[in-house]
Amino acid sequence: MKALMPVEEALQRLLSAAKVLGSESVALDAADGRVLAAPVVARRTTPGADVSAMDGYAVHADDATLDATLRVTGESAAGRPFAGTVTPGAAVRIFTGAVMPEGADAVVIQEDTRREGDAVTVTEAATIGRHIRRAGGDFATGETLLPAGHRLRARDLALAASADVAELAVIRRPRVGLLSTGDELVRPGAGAAAHNVILSNIYSVGALARRAGAEVADLGILPDTMAATQEGVHAALASGIDVLVTTGGASVGDHDLVAPALTAQGVELAVHKIALRPGKPLMFGRSPAGTLVVGLPGNPVSAHVCALLFLVPLLRALQGEAVAPKPALKPARLGVDLKANDHRMDFMRAAIVGEEDGVPVVRPLPVQDSSMLRVLARADVLLVRPPNAPAALAGEPCQILPLED
């Protein structure tokens, strides 16, 4: 029997085939979650001038000694700076974000003053530079604020906007097509009979792909005939997608037709069957025209786990994401004894049951059947057991993979 491919090798083959897609320019309000194709460079200095950090009075620090009384000669508000100069013995009413008037070198906050008409008395002495935000204190024109390969978050959009950048160069979203196979499949709400299985994979796999930045299209359900499978695969590969994801039909049974249908279309399978539980029948290849193909198992838990382990990193790599696209394992401790593992890397559905020294304590859920979505939905994490791992005792360190990133 041919040895199963290790998970790490299979993942490396997927990632090595990922070539970063082209770029496009998008407006800020369309850039959330996109990956930068070029750095964001500041087009202005922020703040553009020295401004007040508080409401109060702009003064000469030498004049604003304890109990000194100063003349209020004007006002500086955000967007409406004071046009004159702060002369000796004078103060200008100033508000947060307003430009510091010429001649002022400190701000006495409102709480440290007592105002009577045009006179203000200082109740706490001023200090030079206090409560002033200096020009360029955040960033300066020409400064690189965000690097290429960075996936944009909400706060990054605010940063780009404040730098006077209205459009961003981002990597094009990968186009993913989801193709389901199986005579037993019916869509939710279609009135499933006892012998039917309700299609669920496209919803979980599609959601993971979208969260990873892809555009996702449902390409339908194929019946279990070689002619229909070949026709469906051919149409999918010709549709202009970047990644074809199939679910089901990836094993070696009489009705598992995806592998031969892919091969008939010239797809060279670099991965087929890996040492993984759940998800042994995973496939990966490339069509002659360059479309990447990921064949996921039909069992819904296996499909979800394989999409998390392989499809999500592949999509991130296609977008040139600078953060390592491989799944990030985290430390944890076992909450129960575990028996030795076999030759397959195991990703067990597990619950977080406590915490010890800041590290979560995890316990596998009692049922690990790859068809049971209720168990997957109840799990907090995947507990990772390396191939041939020895028996482990409760309290020993382990690694986990979050189910949501």
Image: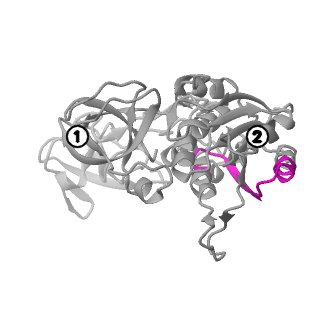
Residue shown at the point (63%, 27%) measured from the top left: 15
Q: Earlier in the sequence, mark 1 or mark 2?
A: 2
Write the residue at 46% across / 44% down: 405
Determine if the magenta segment contains residue 295: no
Q: Which residues are magenta?
A: 210-232
**Amino acid type shown at disc 1:** Val
Q: Are marks 1 and 2 in contact (CB under 8 Å)?
A: no
For the point 28% across and 35% down, which residue is it? 338
Q: What amino acid is found at the position of numbered circle 2 in the picture?
A: Asp
Q: Which residue is mark 1?
A: 336
Instruction: Examine the rendering and report whether any part of residue 152 can be seen.
Output: no
Which quarter of the figure has residue 16? top right
| Image disc number at residue 242 | 2
Observer-nearest of 43 and 170: 170
Question: 162 or 56, which lies in front?
Answer: 162
Q: Position of residue 19 (x, y in %)?
A: 72, 28
Q: Quadrant of residue 346?
A: top left
Cα gap from disc 1 to disc 2, whole angstroms: 43 Å
Q: Residues within 10 Å of mark 1 (few under 14, many from 20)?
A: some
